[in-house]
Amino acid sequence: MTDLPSGTVTMLFTDIEGSTRLLQKLGRDRYVEALRAHRELLRVAARRHGGVEVEMQGDSFHFAFAAARAGVAAAAEMQLALAAHDWPNDPIRVRVGIHTGEPALDGDLYVGIDVHRAARVMSAGHGGQVLVSEPTWAATRHEPADGLSFRDLGEHRLKDLLDPQRIYQVVVDGLPDQFPPLAALGAQVGLPIPPNRLIGREQELVEIAGVLGADARLLTLVGPGGTGKTRLAVQAAAELSDRYPDGVWFVALAPIRDETLVLGAVARAVGHQERSGEELADSLAGELAGKQALLLLDNFEHVIEAAPSVGALLAAAPGLTVLATSREPLRLRGESVLAVAPLPIDTDAAILFAERARAASSGFSLSDENVGAVAAICARLDGLPLALELAAARITTLSPRALLARLDESLGILTGGPRDADERQRTLRGAIDWSYDLLAEQERELFARLGVFAGGARLDAVEGIAGADVFDGLSSLVEKSLLRRSDDADGEPRFWLLETMREYATGQADTAGIAGETRRRHADWFLGLALRAEPELNGPTHTEWLDRLERENDNLRVALAFLIEAGDGEAVLRLAAVTSRLWLVRGSLKEAGRWLEAALAVGGSFPARSRALRRLAVHALDGGDLDRAASAASEALALDQAAGDAQSAAQSAGIVADVAAHRGDLDTAAEMYEVAAEQARVFGDDRELAVTLYNLGNVRRLQGSEDQAEELFVQALAGFRKLGDELGQGGTLLSLVGIHESRGEHARVSELLGQSAGLLAEIGFTSGLLDVIEVGARVAADVGRAEAAARLYGAFNALSEDLGRAGVHPAELASHDASVGQVRTSLGAEHFEAAWAEGADLAVEAAVAYALETVSSIASAETVPAPANR
């Protein structure tokens, strides 16, 4: 073999597209003949540009080039030669991938992550296509060979390379340049992006693939904290993603301490909404029943009591597979268990330590002088990945020899954990103890207090709990690998602890006697955040505040749980009332109801109790539980009246009127709304006035007074616009749509419906968007567009069940059912059911778009094509 290039190397990988199919079609002899011709064409092209053949396996090649430009030119010549060859049968189509990096030489082969990158770039392509990585493009873009150019295909998450890779296509003059989308991990693969590459674990990955490939549907990776179970599971899920076309979802269970919330976390991960009147376990099973999907349930040991729920889900969804990580098995029927051991000390552990040390200090490298100390460090830490990462972070201040001395000293006196605990777990505890002991006193206290946060915390939250001067301490903890940093969607930094670290930090807070004080500060700070958000949720910045609260869902739950445990009725009622608004808009109706009921059970008095009761009544109305809505609203009204608070009483009376309207007592509802509107004017409560005018308008419309209803809606809309309340505007516009619909003014209906949908989509109010879909169905039915109406009614029905809302207003149920019946009769049962099923398979965004297109086409007499399924 010619000497392989070293240093910066451009690696070119090829393989034949559909080789198995081609073999079956041509037969062995003709396939062998074609394979030989293909090999000769590729070898000639590679040699002409200075390429060295590294390896050939079956129908695949690995070539190496000293220059990126030469590698790209060789790839283009390969494709031109293959295209020009006179194939006696089907032409051979080859995909080519190129990456430039610095692989290590191991005898006659290259090793390292750059080799994998080149192979994965190739695997993402199609026959006849040449793909290059960003480093290769950067090295050649200024002077590509004649007849070549590049097309940016964007960033893609390639199989088993979870960090996004920017890929470019080489466009060759005279050859096709249009290909299907890359074979990358799609949107259905919801896995976290690891901060660095996985080292070692090749055997474990093979074992996981083998177990799950043998029809096993539940595999639990077990081992003590710090062995890298999560990182291994994420890598395995990525590599196996093509087995699960309907989805691969990561569910972080570490922040959860209540086993009843596990299925809710799963539902959120897969995008499933709770359904009114149906247990979440049943509706979630129905969602997953027909899917070939993988759930990665991480850190299950915290909620091990929820294991039977997972077993029931697997029984109900035969296409579902679960990969779990836990410190103990789930002990379910059919469970396979794989123990995750530490890394081999003399190989992978040393590589991991060296790589992480080099990341901490760019000047570090293994040498004859330090290799012995590094090997000893790996032995002392028993090959535990987390312990090795903590130790490697200290290379910035300690040499490997000094590091080993400190480690020996610390572990020699260590007795952390029970004496009968797993020795590796005690070693991990010792490694964390050792890193913790090296911290300054202020850093220790900060680290201990950080354990209170579930799902991490932004800087302002940390400052609120640990003091204003924490930035340097946070930076130091990040540098020492004790703390992780990521960015929220709005770009703000979020600091978070690995679960092992969080448990340790919580224990240190207990030891230092600051745990209770820290939990109190945490609850007070997030209550303060909620109270700051409360007035903004009805104004122009409410979307930003909803997003902020949604990012803090886990912390809000922790705060609610502490306040309930502490028996602080006033505080928990105030917090539950605000967070319930978040859950109402963003779709967690049942969870909102559970927290409100739990908060009300603590106690509390006026006005916090009254406000929470009103929120509970609103949630119960949306869920169709009129009895609970009535009792909650009546109790709130009684409290308001007893306290002599007329303004609060008017708000509660408005909800009592809502219940009356839902029960069909329109006259009583109208009288109460009239009184409430007058009281709102007296109090100068602009928002309550707008809400009441809107509700009164709906009652007047149901009573047949459309002109009066329209006037009320116009007044309400003006009020909501003045307040900057997009939710109120969107709902009122929908009611105005109904007025114009009854008059046959479809152009106006189309205009207002589009405005409403835009406002409701902007704030993420799915429940309101369902009403947009229902309007589209109704309008289509009215003008004889029966097929479109059936699709939209099917979408509305399915999505309402997903969300857990009651559907149409009870007063409109009869006309709704009559419209659906009319459509069924028009189409015939078989045609109706088919169209209904098509609609039921639509995502909310697609259904809304189809509704708007349908109404627009009715207004302009244009034809609308059928919608695309999910």
Image (tube, grey):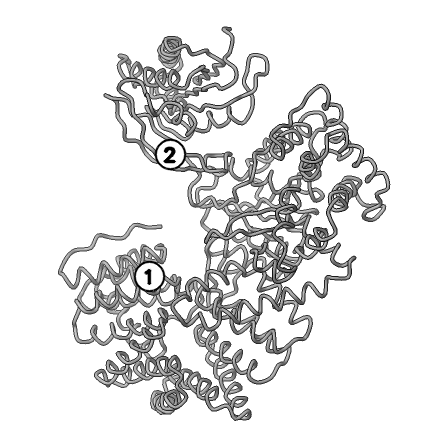
Q: Residue 328 versus residue 232: which sits nearer the camera?
A: 232
x then y, percent, for residue 61 = 44, 17
Kindly tell me whether residue 276 is visible in this rendering. yes
Q: Is residue 147 left or right of residue 575?
A: left
* Quarter of image, res 383: top right
Residue wearing tag 2? 182
Category of crowding for the residue at label 2, using alpha-carbon neighbours closer than 10 angstroms: few (below 14), some (14–19), many (at least 20):
some
Q: Residue at x 44, y 42 (%)?
A: 245
386 lies above or below 840: above
x then y, percent, for residue 593 = 53, 72
| Farthest left residue in view | 861
684 lies above or below 247: below
Category of crowding for the residue at label 1, using alpha-carbon neighbours closer than 10 angstroms: few (below 14), some (14–19), many (at least 20):
many
Secondary structure category for the residue under label 1? helix
Q: Residue at x 37, y 34 (%)?
A: 182
Q: Amino acid at mark 2?
A: Leu
Q: Amino acid at mark 1?
A: Gly
Secondary structure category for the residue under label 2? loop
Q: Is residue 601 left or right of residue 342?
A: left
x then y, percent, for residue 19 = 39, 22
* Quarter of image, res 807: bottom left
| Farthest top residue in view | 1
x then y, percent, for residue 580 = 50, 70
Residue 766 tag number = none
Residue wearing tag 1? 794
Kindly tell me whether residue 331 is visible in this rendering. no
Q: Nearer the viewer, mark 1 or mark 2?
A: 2
Which comes sooner in the sequence, label 1 or label 2? Answer: 2
Q: Is residue 390 left or right of residue 54?
A: right
Q: Residue 502 versus residue 746: which sits nearer the camera?
A: 502
Distance between the Cα atoms at labels 1 and 2?
Answer: 33 Å
Give the total of numbered labels: 2
